[in-house]
Amino acid sequence: MLWVIRFSGFFSAAMVMIVLSPSLQSFPPAEAIRSSRLDSYLRLPSFQVSTSPGSLDDRFTFRKASEFRNVDECGFGDPQTTGVCDPSLVHVAITLDVQYLRGSIAAVHSILQHSLCPENIFFHFLVSEADLETLVRSTFPQLKFKVYFFDPEIVRNLISSSVRQALEEPLNYARNYLADLLEPCVRRVIYLDSDLVVVDDISKLWSTNLGSRTIGAPEYCHANFTKYFTTSFWSDDRFSGTFRGRKPCYFNTGVMVIDLGKWRRVGFTKRIERWMEIQKSDRIYKLGSLPPFLLVFAGRVAPIGHRWNQHGLGGDNVRGSCRDLHSGPVSLLHWSGSGKPWLRLDSKKPCPLDALWAPYDLYGHPH
């Protein structure tokens, strides 16, 4: 297990980078397995990545990741079951957005680096703009994954203005539809944002006991829960009454373990959409896709250790100021907030903790 003490400054960040460095992990390297092809009903629209000047290929060039080799005790699942329905798989869903693509690639890289059995991980990539399958496959040639097209029109009329434009992007709401997008045989998934790195074996997060709950996430009950909703929300019992009989706590939707079977049975997508419709007419919150999740699930979440979401490293949404880690152990570092490590590193104005993201960055040509 990885333990990190609360610290600040560049010197401390450098010391932690040594502790978290992939090259010093106790896990032997492992090898991922090549993906099955996209099913025809999930295939992306028939556009191709252009090779003309200014194309996606020109803007994003990633180095090929190392081939991680498996340790002896890792199994290969049921030989009678192949592809995404293999019950031995750990399922991870991440969006691939052009603006955050560099972060998504780093997140995948970090997961593979620290997993004891990366060949048991199946990635579900959600896209809405471009065919990024070729790019992913060239960066991770042996990765097991699928690409799913999320139609922005599904949520276009449900999205309301937020404090930050990035929170209004349709793909930010794709997590609401995982139960519909992923195959019915996928009954559990870990959803991860694009601005994080995992520095522990993700199978530990996968094994979280959700009990009777539909989702699990680190909760932060010391946070001022009232600030996530407007005064008009709290003054109207039709809205605030939804929390009656519950003890709601803030949780960050960038790291969630989701029981998709229960989600489908209850129909939570429709419940989230209903709150988004109310928001359009009554303006009950200000922050993007988070409040509908709080309205539906807060007080009904299986708690997960805070080590699995050391969030807020991107700073606040106004100034993007630098943040320290919370006290305690670290399994996942999350640059939620307006400041992203790749942008600050490129601008030569990094925060101390951005040095912990840099080892997983595959952007650019080899030196």
Image: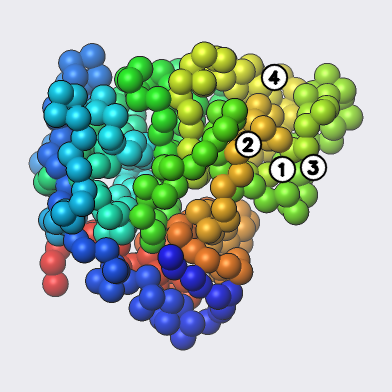
Which circle's residue, 1 or 4, is located before the other in the chain?
A: 1
The amino acid at mark 1 is Cys
Query: Separation of disc 4 and disc 2 at Cα?
Result: 23 Å
Is there CB contact under 8 Å for labels 1 and 2? yes
Q: Which residue is mark 1?
A: 249
Residue 226, label in figure: 3
Q: Position of residue 65 (x, y in %)?
A: 17, 57
Which circle's residue, 1 or 2, is located before the other in the chain?
A: 1
Q: Which residue is mark 2?
A: 301
Secondary-structure class at tag 4: helix
Q: Position of residue 351 (x, y in %)?
A: 48, 72
Q: Which residue is mark 4?
A: 278
Label 3 or label 2, whichever lies nearer to me, is 2
Query: Separation of disc 1 and disc 3 at Cα?
Result: 10 Å
Label 1 or label 4, whichever lies nearer to me, is 1
Q: Quadrant of residue 17?
A: bottom left
Question: Residue at 42% of width from left, 82% of height from top?
Answer: 15
Which circle's residue, 1 or 3, is located before the other in the chain?
A: 3
The amino acid at mark 3 is Thr
Which circle's residue, 3 or 4, is located before the other in the chain?
A: 3
Q: Is residue 289 left or right of residue 24?
A: right
Q: Nearer the viewer, residue 83 or 54?
A: 83
Q: Is residue 41 visible?
A: yes
